[in-house]
């Protein structure tokens, strides 16, 4: 028996029309649209700001249509009853937007540029957080994998249920045809048997359609679970990449800090060496200054001795003069003795002049040596002052380097 014949029999018996499939329910008449109807999504060039989406959503709901969660336009007719987006692109765009918002809500990213003394604890804490995050991510991946496997099993069960429902519907239609054939052969009990067969057929078709609708719902749930698992997997991959990048940055900053510490140690060692050299030079300058002072003392002693010699020469000159006077008086007494006295006096005068010249030369030499000693002493004092200044500069530079170097070097 054909389907047209079955419809005519149902109309003659006054039975209700068969139920529409779930997809046909979406084509039911809706309320009239607003003055400016909205096109079904997606539409290229739409303004996707929050205000525009909210306005289109309100207009779509006022028109009795289901709005797309991403653009606010009506979801095309014929889509699943549980559809939330007008297209796959808008579903993917909305998922990316949600992930960006979640990432932005995590807070400002922290850098690891801190004091050198705090770097080691921060790196250790980062390692602990990375381990805990890895454990959480592994657990989340395992849970997502299990959920995905469960969703796949549910989808397979839903497909099997759908196939079984289709088989039962086919069997029900075959039994209805057999009942119609039996009704033709036995007109006497046709009404009773046809009514019973129709009731059975309606119940079986209703059950089959209910099973099919449940299978479609289960399939939609399985698809949503699979999509959630994919999104969680992508989020886990992104978080793992962020953790790896942070670990790489922490290692790089640790290496830079270690290099800076090594450079500071080397600079401090060089400054200490310069300080020791300056101190050694200062000690040498002080020793030379002490030797110069000793030489100056020796020169002063020699000058004092020369002065004593000059005094003795002057005394001898006075004595010679007195002797000459006595010799002159004696010359008056004796001519022979006078000649000898005169010669002695002339010799004494020559000796006196030579002694005076020697005393003057010695005095000049002593004065020259004293001036040289004083000049050398001044030079040594200037060198000592310069060496002490360099030593102070080196000590100041060493102190600055020690203060600039981290406490934990």
Image (cartoon, rainbow, N blue to C red):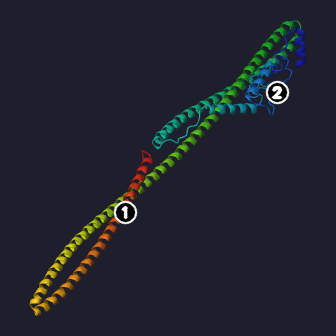
- Graded by Cα atoms within 10 Å as few (under 14), some (14 to 19) or many (20 or more), the crowding at tag 2 reads some
Q: Residue furthest left?
A: 333
Q: Position of residue 15 (x, y in %)?
A: 85, 10
Q: Is residue 312 left or right of residue 288?
A: left
Q: Residues within 10 Å of mark 1 (few under 14, many from 20)?
A: few
**Residue 34 location (% of width, % of height):** 84, 20
* Residue 377 locus on image (x, y percent): 32, 66
State the residue position of label 1. 382
Q: Which mark is residue 269?
A: none
Residue occupying the point 58% across, 37% down: 109
- Nearer the N terminus, badge 2 or badge 1? 2
On residue 40, which mark appears?
2
Q: x%, y% of residue 271?
A: 41, 56
Viewer-nearest residue: 402 or 185:
402
- Quick one: quadrant of the N terminus? top right
Q: Quadrant of residue 245?
A: top right
Placement of 397 over or under 357, stated as above or below: above
Residue 1 visible to the viewer: no
Q: Is residue 333 above or below residue 246?
A: below
Q: Is residue 110 left or right of residue 86?
A: left
- Seen in the picture, residue 143 relative to 331 is either above or below; the reply is above
Q: Does 380 sit left or right of 203 as displayed? A: left
Q: Which secondary structure lies at badge 2? A: loop
Q: Secondary structure at mark 1?
A: helix
Mark 2 in CB contact with mark 1 (< 8 angstroms): no
């Amino acid at each position: 028996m054909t389907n047209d014949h079955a419809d005519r029999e149902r109309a003659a018996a006054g039975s209700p029309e068969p139920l529409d499939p779930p997809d046909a329910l979406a084509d039911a008449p809706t309320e009239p649209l607003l003055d400016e109807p909205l096109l079904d999504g997606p539409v290229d060039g739409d303004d996707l700001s929050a205000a525009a989406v909210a306005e289109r959503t309100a207009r779509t709901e006022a028109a009795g249509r289901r709005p797309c969660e991403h653009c606010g336009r009506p979801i095309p007719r014929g889509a699943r009853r549980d559809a939330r987006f007008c297209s796959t692109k808008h579903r993917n765009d909305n998922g990316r937007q949600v992930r960006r918002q979640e990432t932005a809500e995590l807070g400002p990213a922290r850098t690891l540029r801190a004091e050198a003394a705090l770097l080691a604890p921060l790196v250790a804490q980062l390692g602990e957080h990375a381990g805990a995050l890895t454990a959480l991510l592994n657990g989340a991946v395992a849970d997502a994998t299990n959920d995905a496997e469960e969703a796949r099993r549910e989808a397979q069960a839903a497909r099997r249920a759908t196939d079984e429902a289709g088989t039962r519907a086919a069997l029900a239609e075959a039994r209805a045809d057999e009942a119609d054939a039996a009704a033709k052969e036995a007109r006497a009990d046709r009404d009773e048997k046809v009514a019973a067969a129709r009731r059975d057929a309606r119940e079986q078709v209703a059950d089959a359609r209910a099973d099919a609708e449940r299978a479609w719902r289960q399939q939609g749930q399985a698809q949503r679970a699979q999509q959630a698992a994919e999104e969680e997997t992508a989020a886990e991959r992104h978080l793992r990449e962020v953790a790896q990048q942070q670990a790489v940055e922490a290692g790089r900053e640790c290496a830079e800090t270690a290099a800076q510490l090594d450079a500071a140690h080397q600079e401090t060692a060089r400054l200490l060496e310069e300080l020791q050299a300056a101190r050694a030079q200062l000690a040498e300058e002080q020793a030379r200054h002490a030797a110069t002072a000793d030489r100056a003392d020796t020169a002063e002693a020699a000058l004092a001795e020369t002065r004593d010699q000059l005094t003795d020469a002057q005394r001898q000159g006075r004595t010679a003069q007195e002797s000459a006077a006595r010799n002159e008086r004696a010359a008056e007494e004796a001519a022979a003795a006078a000649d000898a006295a005169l010669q002695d006096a002339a010799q004494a005068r020559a000796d006196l002049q030579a002694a005076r010249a020697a005393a003057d030369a010695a005095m000049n030499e002593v004065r020259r040596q004293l001036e040289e000693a004083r000049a050398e002493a001044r030079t040594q004092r200037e060198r000592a002052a310069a060496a002490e200044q360099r030593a102070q500069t080196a000590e100041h530079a060493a102190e600055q380097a020690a203060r600039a170097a981290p406490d934990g070097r």
